[in-house]
Amino acid sequence: MTSPPRAARPRGVRARIVTTTALLTLVGMAALVALTALVLARISDADARSFLADRAEAVAHAVVGADGTLDRRPDLSNVSDEVSWVFDDAGLHVHGPTGTDLDRSAARLGRSRAVTAEHTDGWLLYATPLPGGVGVVVVGASLRPYQSTLDHALLVAAALGLLVVAAVTALSAWVVTRALRPVTSMARAAAEWSEAHLDRRFDLGPPDDEITELGAVLDALLGRVAGALTAEQRLTSELAHELRTPLTVVRAEAELALHGEITPDESERLARIIEATDHMASVIETLLGAARGAAAADVSAPVGELLEQVVGGPALGPASVPVVVEGDVGLSVATPLDVAARALSPLVANAVRHARAQVTLRAVDAGALVAIEVEDDGAGVAPDQLDSVFVPGQRSPDSPGAGLGLPLARRVARASGGDVHVVADRPSCFVLTLPKAARARS
Protein backbone atom coordinates (compact mmCIF):
# COMPACT_ATOMS: atom_id res chain seq x y z
CA MET A 1 0.00 0.00 0.00
CA THR A 2 1.28 3.41 -0.86
CA SER A 3 1.55 5.67 2.14
CA PRO A 4 -0.14 9.06 1.99
CA PRO A 5 2.06 11.91 0.82
CA ARG A 6 3.47 14.03 3.56
CA ALA A 7 3.26 17.74 3.06
CA ALA A 8 6.49 19.65 3.18
CA ARG A 9 6.97 20.58 6.74
CA PRO A 10 7.59 24.31 7.28
CA ARG A 11 10.45 25.37 9.49
CA GLY A 12 9.29 25.73 13.06
CA VAL A 13 9.42 28.82 15.23
CA ARG A 14 12.24 27.28 17.27
CA ALA A 15 14.40 26.74 14.18
CA ARG A 16 13.72 30.26 12.90
CA ILE A 17 14.57 31.88 16.24
CA VAL A 18 17.75 29.84 16.71
CA THR A 19 18.85 30.42 13.11
CA THR A 20 18.19 34.16 13.34
CA THR A 21 20.06 34.37 16.64
CA ALA A 22 23.02 32.46 15.21
CA LEU A 23 23.15 34.67 12.10
CA LEU A 24 22.90 37.90 14.09
CA THR A 25 25.59 36.70 16.50
CA LEU A 26 27.80 35.67 13.59
CA VAL A 27 27.38 39.06 11.90
CA GLY A 28 28.06 40.84 15.19
CA MET A 29 31.20 38.80 15.89
CA ALA A 30 32.42 39.32 12.31
CA ALA A 31 31.97 43.08 12.71
CA LEU A 32 33.74 42.93 16.07
CA VAL A 33 36.69 41.00 14.59
CA ALA A 34 36.91 43.46 11.69
CA LEU A 35 36.87 46.40 14.11
CA THR A 36 39.52 44.67 16.24
CA ALA A 37 41.70 44.18 13.15
CA LEU A 38 41.35 47.86 12.25
CA VAL A 39 42.22 49.01 15.78
CA LEU A 40 45.18 46.63 16.06
CA ALA A 41 46.49 47.75 12.66
CA ARG A 42 46.35 51.39 13.74
CA ILE A 43 48.02 50.60 17.08
CA SER A 44 50.78 48.61 15.31
CA ASP A 45 51.38 51.43 12.85
CA ALA A 46 51.53 53.99 15.67
CA ASP A 47 53.97 51.82 17.62
CA ALA A 48 56.20 51.40 14.57
CA ARG A 49 56.19 55.15 13.89
CA SER A 50 57.03 55.91 17.52
CA PHE A 51 59.87 53.39 17.46
CA LEU A 52 61.30 54.88 14.23
CA ALA A 53 60.90 58.44 15.51
CA ASP A 54 63.06 57.57 18.54
CA ARG A 55 65.66 55.92 16.33
CA ALA A 56 65.71 58.86 13.91
CA GLU A 57 66.24 61.26 16.82
CA ALA A 58 69.17 59.18 18.09
CA VAL A 59 70.76 59.13 14.60
CA ALA A 60 70.26 62.89 14.25
CA HIS A 61 72.15 63.53 17.50
CA ALA A 62 74.97 61.29 16.30
CA VAL A 63 75.46 62.87 12.85
CA VAL A 64 75.13 66.58 13.73
CA GLY A 65 78.10 68.05 15.53
CA ALA A 66 78.13 70.59 18.30
CA ASP A 67 78.75 73.30 15.75
CA GLY A 68 75.63 72.33 13.80
CA THR A 69 77.46 70.82 10.85
CA LEU A 70 76.84 67.40 9.30
CA ASP A 71 79.38 64.74 10.10
CA ARG A 72 80.00 62.91 6.83
CA ARG A 73 81.72 59.97 8.48
CA PRO A 74 79.60 59.35 11.55
CA ASP A 75 79.95 56.36 13.82
CA LEU A 76 76.41 55.04 14.25
CA SER A 77 77.26 51.63 15.65
CA ASN A 78 75.89 52.57 19.06
CA VAL A 79 72.68 54.27 17.97
CA SER A 80 71.37 52.42 14.89
CA ASP A 81 71.72 49.40 12.66
CA GLU A 82 72.28 49.15 8.95
CA VAL A 83 68.65 50.25 8.09
CA SER A 84 69.44 53.94 8.45
CA TRP A 85 70.33 56.51 5.81
CA VAL A 86 71.70 60.02 6.13
CA PHE A 87 71.44 62.55 3.32
CA ASP A 88 72.89 66.08 3.19
CA ASP A 89 70.96 69.23 2.37
CA ALA A 90 71.47 68.56 -1.34
CA GLY A 91 69.96 65.08 -1.06
CA LEU A 92 73.29 63.31 -1.53
CA HIS A 93 73.83 60.00 0.23
CA VAL A 94 76.11 60.38 3.25
CA HIS A 95 75.58 57.22 5.24
CA GLY A 96 73.55 54.01 5.06
CA PRO A 97 73.23 50.79 3.08
CA THR A 98 73.43 50.69 -0.69
CA GLY A 99 72.29 48.12 -3.19
CA THR A 100 69.07 47.24 -1.39
CA ASP A 101 65.52 47.41 -2.67
CA LEU A 102 64.77 50.22 -0.23
CA ASP A 103 67.50 52.59 -1.50
CA ARG A 104 65.31 54.31 -4.07
CA SER A 105 62.51 54.94 -1.61
CA ALA A 106 65.02 56.14 1.02
CA ALA A 107 66.64 58.50 -1.52
CA ARG A 108 63.29 60.00 -2.41
CA LEU A 109 62.46 60.56 1.24
CA GLY A 110 65.96 62.02 1.75
CA ARG A 111 64.98 65.03 -0.37
CA SER A 112 61.93 65.84 1.77
CA ARG A 113 61.97 68.71 4.21
CA ALA A 114 59.20 67.46 6.51
CA VAL A 115 58.59 64.47 8.70
CA THR A 116 57.39 61.73 6.32
CA ALA A 117 56.46 58.06 6.69
CA GLU A 118 55.98 55.61 3.84
CA HIS A 119 55.02 51.92 3.59
CA THR A 120 56.95 50.00 0.95
CA ASP A 121 57.53 46.27 0.41
CA GLY A 122 56.53 45.31 3.96
CA TRP A 123 58.68 48.03 5.51
CA LEU A 124 57.94 51.36 7.13
CA LEU A 125 60.39 54.17 6.21
CA TYR A 126 60.47 57.26 8.38
CA ALA A 127 62.22 60.49 7.34
CA THR A 128 62.87 63.52 9.54
CA PRO A 129 64.92 66.67 8.79
CA LEU A 130 68.16 67.17 10.71
CA PRO A 131 68.57 70.21 13.00
CA GLY A 132 69.53 73.33 11.12
CA GLY A 133 68.39 71.88 7.82
CA VAL A 134 71.77 70.28 7.16
CA GLY A 135 70.21 67.09 5.88
CA VAL A 136 67.65 64.35 6.37
CA VAL A 137 67.83 61.09 8.26
CA VAL A 138 65.76 58.10 7.05
CA VAL A 139 65.24 55.01 9.17
CA GLY A 140 63.33 51.85 8.40
CA ALA A 141 61.76 48.92 10.23
CA SER A 142 60.27 45.66 8.94
CA LEU A 143 56.55 45.30 9.55
CA ARG A 144 56.63 41.50 9.50
CA PRO A 145 56.78 41.13 13.32
CA TYR A 146 53.88 43.54 13.67
CA GLN A 147 51.92 41.73 10.96
CA SER A 148 52.63 38.35 12.55
CA THR A 149 51.38 39.61 15.89
CA LEU A 150 48.30 41.07 14.17
CA ASP A 151 47.60 37.79 12.34
CA HIS A 152 47.84 35.78 15.55
CA ALA A 153 45.57 38.23 17.34
CA LEU A 154 42.98 38.04 14.54
CA LEU A 155 43.16 34.25 14.51
CA VAL A 156 42.53 34.12 18.23
CA ALA A 157 39.72 36.68 17.90
CA ALA A 158 38.09 34.66 15.08
CA ALA A 159 38.34 31.43 17.09
CA LEU A 160 36.83 33.11 20.13
CA GLY A 161 34.13 34.60 17.92
CA LEU A 162 33.17 31.16 16.59
CA LEU A 163 33.08 29.81 20.12
CA VAL A 164 30.84 32.68 21.17
CA VAL A 165 28.53 32.06 18.20
CA ALA A 166 28.33 28.35 19.02
CA ALA A 167 27.71 29.06 22.70
CA VAL A 168 25.03 31.68 21.99
CA THR A 169 23.35 29.37 19.46
CA ALA A 170 23.32 26.45 21.90
CA LEU A 171 22.06 28.69 24.70
CA SER A 172 19.31 30.18 22.52
CA ALA A 173 18.27 26.69 21.37
CA TRP A 174 18.04 25.56 24.98
CA VAL A 175 16.12 28.64 26.09
CA VAL A 176 13.73 28.57 23.11
CA THR A 177 13.13 24.85 23.52
CA ARG A 178 12.25 25.29 27.18
CA ALA A 179 10.07 28.29 26.38
CA LEU A 180 8.18 26.54 23.56
CA ARG A 181 7.90 23.13 25.23
CA PRO A 182 4.55 24.02 26.88
CA VAL A 183 3.27 25.27 23.52
CA THR A 184 4.25 22.01 21.80
CA SER A 185 2.62 19.95 24.54
CA MET A 186 -0.53 22.05 24.37
CA ALA A 187 -0.72 21.74 20.58
CA ARG A 188 -0.39 17.95 20.74
CA ALA A 189 -2.93 17.70 23.52
CA ALA A 190 -5.39 19.94 21.66
CA ALA A 191 -5.01 17.82 18.49
CA GLU A 192 -5.62 14.63 20.50
CA TRP A 193 -8.57 16.07 22.40
CA SER A 194 -10.18 17.39 19.20
CA GLU A 195 -10.35 13.82 17.92
CA ALA A 196 -11.76 11.96 20.90
CA HIS A 197 -11.85 14.05 24.10
CA LEU A 198 -13.65 17.29 23.35
CA ASP A 199 -14.62 17.60 27.01
CA ARG A 200 -10.99 18.09 28.09
CA ARG A 201 -9.65 21.59 28.82
CA PHE A 202 -6.32 23.08 29.90
CA ASP A 203 -7.83 25.27 32.65
CA LEU A 204 -4.67 27.35 33.19
CA GLY A 205 -6.56 30.07 35.01
CA PRO A 206 -6.81 33.76 34.13
CA PRO A 207 -4.32 34.69 31.37
CA ASP A 208 -1.24 36.39 32.81
CA ASP A 209 1.34 35.55 30.12
CA GLU A 210 1.54 34.25 26.55
CA ILE A 211 1.25 30.57 27.56
CA THR A 212 -1.85 30.99 29.71
CA GLU A 213 -3.36 33.24 27.04
CA LEU A 214 -2.79 30.50 24.46
CA GLY A 215 -4.36 27.97 26.83
CA ALA A 216 -7.44 30.16 27.18
CA VAL A 217 -7.73 30.55 23.40
CA LEU A 218 -7.40 26.78 22.88
CA ASP A 219 -9.99 26.11 25.58
CA ALA A 220 -12.42 28.44 23.84
CA LEU A 221 -11.65 26.86 20.46
CA LEU A 222 -12.19 23.34 21.82
CA GLY A 223 -15.47 24.50 23.31
CA ARG A 224 -16.65 25.84 19.95
CA VAL A 225 -15.56 22.65 18.15
CA ALA A 226 -17.34 20.52 20.72
CA GLY A 227 -20.48 22.63 20.36
CA ALA A 228 -20.40 22.41 16.56
CA LEU A 229 -19.90 18.64 16.58
CA THR A 230 -22.61 18.16 19.17
CA ALA A 231 -25.04 20.23 17.09
CA GLU A 232 -24.10 18.28 13.96
CA GLN A 233 -24.54 14.94 15.70
CA ARG A 234 -27.86 16.04 17.14
CA LEU A 235 -29.10 17.16 13.71
CA THR A 236 -27.99 13.92 12.07
CA SER A 237 -29.61 11.88 14.81
CA GLU A 238 -32.87 13.81 14.59
CA LEU A 239 -33.04 13.56 10.80
CA ALA A 240 -32.31 9.84 10.88
CA HIS A 241 -34.93 9.33 13.58
CA GLU A 242 -37.55 11.29 11.66
CA LEU A 243 -36.93 9.23 8.52
CA ARG A 244 -37.59 5.95 10.29
CA THR A 245 -41.39 6.40 10.44
CA PRO A 246 -42.02 7.16 6.75
CA LEU A 247 -39.67 4.35 5.76
CA THR A 248 -41.60 1.95 7.97
CA VAL A 249 -44.86 3.08 6.38
CA VAL A 250 -43.46 2.71 2.86
CA ARG A 251 -42.19 -0.79 3.59
CA ALA A 252 -45.46 -1.85 5.22
CA GLU A 253 -47.52 -0.55 2.34
CA ALA A 254 -45.23 -2.30 -0.15
CA GLU A 255 -45.54 -5.60 1.75
CA LEU A 256 -49.33 -5.29 1.90
CA ALA A 257 -49.49 -4.58 -1.81
CA LEU A 258 -47.17 -7.51 -2.48
CA HIS A 259 -49.71 -9.93 -0.95
CA GLY A 260 -52.53 -8.64 -3.07
CA GLU A 261 -53.62 -9.55 -6.60
CA ILE A 262 -50.79 -8.01 -8.69
CA THR A 263 -48.95 -8.86 -11.86
CA PRO A 264 -45.44 -10.37 -11.81
CA ASP A 265 -44.04 -7.06 -13.05
CA GLU A 266 -45.70 -5.18 -10.18
CA SER A 267 -44.48 -7.80 -7.72
CA GLU A 268 -40.90 -7.26 -8.90
CA ARG A 269 -41.23 -3.52 -8.51
CA LEU A 270 -42.61 -3.83 -5.00
CA ALA A 271 -39.77 -6.19 -4.07
CA ARG A 272 -37.28 -3.57 -5.24
CA ILE A 273 -39.08 -0.96 -3.13
CA ILE A 274 -38.80 -3.20 -0.06
CA GLU A 275 -35.11 -3.82 -0.78
CA ALA A 276 -34.48 -0.08 -1.16
CA THR A 277 -36.27 0.71 2.12
CA ASP A 278 -34.21 -1.94 3.90
CA HIS A 279 -31.07 -0.36 2.48
CA MET A 280 -32.20 3.10 3.57
CA ALA A 281 -32.97 1.78 7.05
CA SER A 282 -29.46 0.35 7.20
CA VAL A 283 -28.04 3.71 6.11
CA ILE A 284 -30.04 5.45 8.82
CA GLU A 285 -28.70 3.10 11.47
CA THR A 286 -25.19 3.75 10.21
CA LEU A 287 -25.73 7.51 10.37
CA LEU A 288 -27.03 7.20 13.89
CA GLY A 289 -23.95 5.24 14.90
CA ALA A 290 -21.65 7.79 13.25
CA ALA A 291 -23.53 10.63 14.93
CA ARG A 292 -22.99 9.03 18.30
CA GLY A 293 -19.32 8.38 17.47
CA ALA A 294 -19.75 4.72 18.27
CA ALA A 295 -16.92 2.42 17.19
CA ALA A 296 -17.58 -1.29 17.13
CA ALA A 297 -14.83 -3.29 18.79
CA ASP A 298 -16.52 -6.66 19.45
CA VAL A 299 -17.80 -7.41 15.96
CA SER A 300 -16.21 -8.85 12.86
CA ALA A 301 -17.04 -8.54 9.18
CA PRO A 302 -15.27 -10.49 6.40
CA VAL A 303 -13.66 -8.22 3.83
CA GLY A 304 -14.76 -10.51 0.99
CA GLU A 305 -18.39 -10.20 2.05
CA LEU A 306 -17.98 -6.46 2.46
CA LEU A 307 -16.63 -6.03 -1.07
CA GLU A 308 -19.33 -8.28 -2.48
CA GLN A 309 -22.08 -6.31 -0.74
CA VAL A 310 -20.72 -2.96 -1.94
CA VAL A 311 -20.12 -4.03 -5.53
CA GLY A 312 -23.42 -5.86 -5.90
CA GLY A 313 -25.56 -3.77 -3.59
CA PRO A 314 -28.26 -1.27 -4.58
CA ALA A 315 -26.16 1.72 -3.52
CA LEU A 316 -23.80 1.26 -6.45
CA GLY A 317 -26.44 0.44 -9.02
CA PRO A 318 -25.50 -0.83 -12.46
CA ALA A 319 -21.79 -0.06 -12.74
CA SER A 320 -20.78 1.60 -16.00
CA VAL A 321 -17.28 0.08 -15.80
CA PRO A 322 -16.08 -3.29 -14.48
CA VAL A 323 -15.00 -3.43 -10.83
CA VAL A 324 -12.06 -5.77 -10.19
CA VAL A 325 -11.39 -7.15 -6.71
CA GLU A 326 -7.79 -7.99 -5.72
CA GLY A 327 -5.70 -8.60 -2.61
CA ASP A 328 -6.35 -10.54 0.56
CA VAL A 329 -10.15 -10.82 0.70
CA GLY A 330 -9.89 -13.32 3.56
CA LEU A 331 -9.23 -10.53 6.07
CA SER A 332 -11.84 -9.36 8.56
CA VAL A 333 -12.52 -5.93 10.03
CA ALA A 334 -13.70 -5.13 13.55
CA THR A 335 -16.64 -3.11 12.21
CA PRO A 336 -20.28 -4.05 11.55
CA LEU A 337 -20.77 -5.02 7.96
CA ASP A 338 -23.36 -2.32 7.27
CA VAL A 339 -21.15 0.37 8.82
CA ALA A 340 -18.10 -0.74 6.82
CA ALA A 341 -20.21 -0.82 3.66
CA ARG A 342 -21.46 2.69 4.37
CA ALA A 343 -17.83 3.88 4.60
CA LEU A 344 -16.73 2.05 1.43
CA SER A 345 -19.75 2.62 -0.84
CA PRO A 346 -19.16 6.35 -1.49
CA LEU A 347 -15.54 5.63 -2.46
CA VAL A 348 -16.56 2.93 -4.94
CA ALA A 349 -19.41 5.02 -6.35
CA ASN A 350 -17.04 7.97 -6.79
CA ALA A 351 -14.48 5.75 -8.56
CA VAL A 352 -17.12 4.27 -10.91
CA ARG A 353 -18.38 7.76 -11.69
CA HIS A 354 -14.93 9.02 -12.76
CA ALA A 355 -13.30 5.87 -14.18
CA ARG A 356 -12.66 5.43 -17.89
CA ALA A 357 -12.33 1.66 -18.19
CA GLN A 358 -11.93 -0.03 -14.80
CA VAL A 359 -12.13 0.31 -11.02
CA THR A 360 -9.86 -1.81 -8.82
CA LEU A 361 -10.61 -2.73 -5.21
CA ARG A 362 -7.58 -4.06 -3.35
CA ALA A 363 -7.57 -5.41 0.22
CA VAL A 364 -4.23 -5.07 2.02
CA ASP A 365 -3.09 -6.24 5.45
CA ALA A 366 -1.72 -3.12 7.21
CA GLY A 367 -0.82 -4.53 10.62
CA ALA A 368 -3.51 -3.56 13.11
CA LEU A 369 -5.59 -2.15 10.23
CA VAL A 370 -7.11 -3.44 7.03
CA ALA A 371 -6.62 -1.10 4.09
CA ILE A 372 -9.01 -1.21 1.15
CA GLU A 373 -7.67 0.69 -1.85
CA VAL A 374 -10.18 2.04 -4.36
CA GLU A 375 -8.36 2.99 -7.55
CA ASP A 376 -9.76 4.20 -10.85
CA ASP A 377 -8.16 5.11 -14.17
CA GLY A 378 -9.89 8.44 -14.52
CA ALA A 379 -8.51 11.96 -14.66
CA GLY A 380 -7.69 11.91 -10.96
CA VAL A 381 -7.98 14.53 -8.25
CA ALA A 382 -6.27 17.87 -8.76
CA PRO A 383 -3.40 18.45 -6.31
CA ASP A 384 -5.11 21.52 -4.86
CA GLN A 385 -8.27 19.48 -4.14
CA LEU A 386 -6.72 16.57 -2.24
CA ASP A 387 -7.99 17.99 1.06
CA SER A 388 -11.11 19.80 -0.10
CA VAL A 389 -12.75 16.61 -1.46
CA PHE A 390 -13.45 15.66 2.15
CA VAL A 391 -15.16 18.96 2.96
CA PRO A 392 -18.96 18.58 2.90
CA GLY A 393 -20.47 20.28 -0.14
CA GLN A 394 -17.11 20.73 -1.90
CA ARG A 395 -16.86 19.11 -5.33
CA SER A 396 -15.19 19.66 -8.67
CA PRO A 397 -17.14 21.67 -11.29
CA ASP A 398 -17.61 18.61 -13.52
CA SER A 399 -18.80 16.32 -10.71
CA PRO A 400 -22.51 15.37 -10.78
CA GLY A 401 -22.53 14.53 -7.06
CA ALA A 402 -23.48 16.72 -4.13
CA GLY A 403 -20.08 16.57 -2.43
CA LEU A 404 -21.38 14.64 0.58
CA GLY A 405 -20.33 11.02 -0.08
CA LEU A 406 -16.59 11.29 0.57
CA PRO A 407 -16.97 13.39 3.76
CA LEU A 408 -19.52 10.86 5.05
CA ALA A 409 -17.17 7.97 4.23
CA ARG A 410 -14.37 9.59 6.22
CA ARG A 411 -16.64 10.38 9.15
CA VAL A 412 -18.03 6.84 9.34
CA ALA A 413 -14.51 5.40 9.06
CA ARG A 414 -13.16 7.62 11.82
CA ALA A 415 -16.13 6.80 14.05
CA SER A 416 -15.14 3.14 13.57
CA GLY A 417 -11.49 3.72 14.44
CA GLY A 418 -10.21 4.04 10.86
CA ASP A 419 -9.79 6.77 8.28
CA VAL A 420 -10.05 7.65 4.59
CA HIS A 421 -7.32 9.46 2.64
CA VAL A 422 -6.05 9.98 -0.88
CA VAL A 423 -2.67 8.45 -1.72
CA ALA A 424 -2.36 9.54 -5.36
CA ASP A 425 -3.82 12.20 -7.58
CA ARG A 426 -3.31 10.58 -11.03
CA PRO A 427 -4.77 8.02 -11.10
CA SER A 428 -6.77 8.71 -7.98
CA CYS A 429 -6.61 6.10 -5.23
CA PHE A 430 -8.71 6.43 -2.10
CA VAL A 431 -7.76 4.22 0.84
CA LEU A 432 -10.21 3.16 3.53
CA THR A 433 -8.60 1.84 6.72
CA LEU A 434 -10.57 -0.03 9.36
CA PRO A 435 -9.42 -1.86 12.51
CA LYS A 436 -8.57 -5.48 11.89
CA ALA A 437 -10.68 -8.03 13.73
CA ALA A 438 -8.96 -9.43 16.83
CA ARG A 439 -9.13 -12.98 15.50
CA ALA A 440 -7.43 -11.90 12.26
CA ARG A 441 -4.72 -10.03 14.17
CA SER A 442 -3.88 -13.06 16.27
Image (spheres, rainbow, N blue to C red):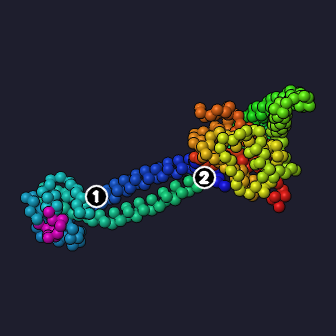
Distance CA(mark 1)–CA(mark 2): 48 Å
Looking at the rendering, which quadrant does residue 267 occupy?
Answer: top right
Asked if one can make out residue 414 in the rendered structure from this viewpoint, the answer is: no
Identify the magenta region. 94-104
Image quadrant holding the N terminus, namely bottom right
- Mark 2 lies on a secondary structure that is helix
- Looking at the image, residue 217 sits to the left or right of residue 14; the answer is right
The image shows residue 273, relative to residue 79, as above or below, that is above
What residue lies at 44% left-to-right and 53% top-to-bottom? 30
Foreground pick, 261 / 325: 261
How many discs mark residues in the rendered view?
2
- Looking at the image, residue 222 sits to the left or right of residue 177; the answer is right
Foreground pick, 136 / 99: 99
- Looking at the image, residue 246 sits to the left or right of residue 225; the answer is right
- Mark 1 lies on a secondary structure that is helix
What residue lies at 90% left-to-right and 28% top-to-bottom? 261
Foreground pick, 113 / 291: 291
Give the percent coordinates (x, y) of residue 358.
63, 47
What residue lies at 45% left-to-right and 59% top-to-bottom? 158
Asked if one can make out residue 152 in the rendered structure from this viewpoint, the answer is: yes
